[in-house]
């Protein structure tokens, strides 16, 4: 029997934290605030730019700002932009607080639930793994403690926090299981390489497995692996996958250098991983992808759009995260040219690719309601996919 999911509520599973009515209301308030900022407040930045910042820049420089960096300078002292930025940053911090409260309240029960789930898939942790400096040095996207910090023995806290927060951050528009990026990547593969049948798949930087589990459904005969540097998110991912009936082999590893054998995987994917690594690490990851890919294999990294495909103003707005959301490598990741990275990391640049794929969630909603409503992420209803074939 097919289950009809409530598209306005995150889907329950065996380790998702419960909320009291007050906790749920607090989270819904933050979600509504984020939607209000995106739909009603953010557009006012364009008016402020056109009315004040652009003319002031033109008077000072004899021309209009031409790049997103110049627009950033023009808007640096714009009161409306500062007002919106403050609200945007506060909404991010409010989001994390709203999900931390129920996690902290029931953490012992969540840890016990995760420890009891051992029948399906595997979990391999490495206490000696050195957490990369680019993770240790900053709480990425303001998430307290990042993916790796442990607050108690056998901790799952930041996995639980992340699972709930992603749904709020995307305002529900990554689907009831937060799986939109994986679903979208799979849709592109099935449309563009329909004969492709991967036998072993690796999800790099899988966190709690939001996108990982979609591959279990797309290719049920494939052996699915997920890696991350954070033990708390992996413990949670393992329990979450089992509660949803999926078999995944999770291991704590740095995607720059794994312990898998050469040619282990037919398909390697990542979902919004690249922008959370350094420039050097991203190239090391691609070299590792080349080593791990079997002949005929495909590697795909899914991200939000590169700046070159946007107007200078839209690139400026997308670049907000670089300086205001603890995403220091965000900007550089949006300057990537797939063929250049391929050539520098062992791939044939002629086999590199870049593509846009409409959000699978938005496409499903459009089909269901006959109305297309682009989400406030993924470049207005699409994800940027880049990678290479071997």
Image (cartoon, rainbow, N blue to C red):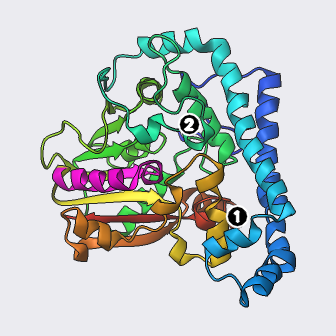
Q: Secondary structure at mark 2?
A: loop
Asked if residue 54 lies in the magenta stretch, the reply is: no
Can you say whether 205 is above or below 183 in the image? above
Residue at position x 76%, y 54% in the image: 85
- Give residue 39's quadrant in the image: bottom right
Where are the magenta residues, as a range?
269-291
Q: Which mark is residue 351?
A: none
Taking 110 as reference, is 55 left or right?
Answer: right
Where is residue 33? Give x, y as percent.
81, 46
Residue at the spot of label 2: 139
Residue toward you, 81 or 240: 81
Tell me which numbered mark, 1 or 2, is placed earlier along the sequence: 2
Count residues near mark 1 (Cα–Cα under 10 Å), then give few for <14, some for 14-19, many for 20+.
some
Residue at the (16%, 45%) spot, across then down: 264
Task: Identify whether 179 is placed above or below 17.
Answer: below
* 207 left or right, relative to 8: left
The answer to whether residue 22 shows anywhere in this view is yes
């Amino acid at each position: 029997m097919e289950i009809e999911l409530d598209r306005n509520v995150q889907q329950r599973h065996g380790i998702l934290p419960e909320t009291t009515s007050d906790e749920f209301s607090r989270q819904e308030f933050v979600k509504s605030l984020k939607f209000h900022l995106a739909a009603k407040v953010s557009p006012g930045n364009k008016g402020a730019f056109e009315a004040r910042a652009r003319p002031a820049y033109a008077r000072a420089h004899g021309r209009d700002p031409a790049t997103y960096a110049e627009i950033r300078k023009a808007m640096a002292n714009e009161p409306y932009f500062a007002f919106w930025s403050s609200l945007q940053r506060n909404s991010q911090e409010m989001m994390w607080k709203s999900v931390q409260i129920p996690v902290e309240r029931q953490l012992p029960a969540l840890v016990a639930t995760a420890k009891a789930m051992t029948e399906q898939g595997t979990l391999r942790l490495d206490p000696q793994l050195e957490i990369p400096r680019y993770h240790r040095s900053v709480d990425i996207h303001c998430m307290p403690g990042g993916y790796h910090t442990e607050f108690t023995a056998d901790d799952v806290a930041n996995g639980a926090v992340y699972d709930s927060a992603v749904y709020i951050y995307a305002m529900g528009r990554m689907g009831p299981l937060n799986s939109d990026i994986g679903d979208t990547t799979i849709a592109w593969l099935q449309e563009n390489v329909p004969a492709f049948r991967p036998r072993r798949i690796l999800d790099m930087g899988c966190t709690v497995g939001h996108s990982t589990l979609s591959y279990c459904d797309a290719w049920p005969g494939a052996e699915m692996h997920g890696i991350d540097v954070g033990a708390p998110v992996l413990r949670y991912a393992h329990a979450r996958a089992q509660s949803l009936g999926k078999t995944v082999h999770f291991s704590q590893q740095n995607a720059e250098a794994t312990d898998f054998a050469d040619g282990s995987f037919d398909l390697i994917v990542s979902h919004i991983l690249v922008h959370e690594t350094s420039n050097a690490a991203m190239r090391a990851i691609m070299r590792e992808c080349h080593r791990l890919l079997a002949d005929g294999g495909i590697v795909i990294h899914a991200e939000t759009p590169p700046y070159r495909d946007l107007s200078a103003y839209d690139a400026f707005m997308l670049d907000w995260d670089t300086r205001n959301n603890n995403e220091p490598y965000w900007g550089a990741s949006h300057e990537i040219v797939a063929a250049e990275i391929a050539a520098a990391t062992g791939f044939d640049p002629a086999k590199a690719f870049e593509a846009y794929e409409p959000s699978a969630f938005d496409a499903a909603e459009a089909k269901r309601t006959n109305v297309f409503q682009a989400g406030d992420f993924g470049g207005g209803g699409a994800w940027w996919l880049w990678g290479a074939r071997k």
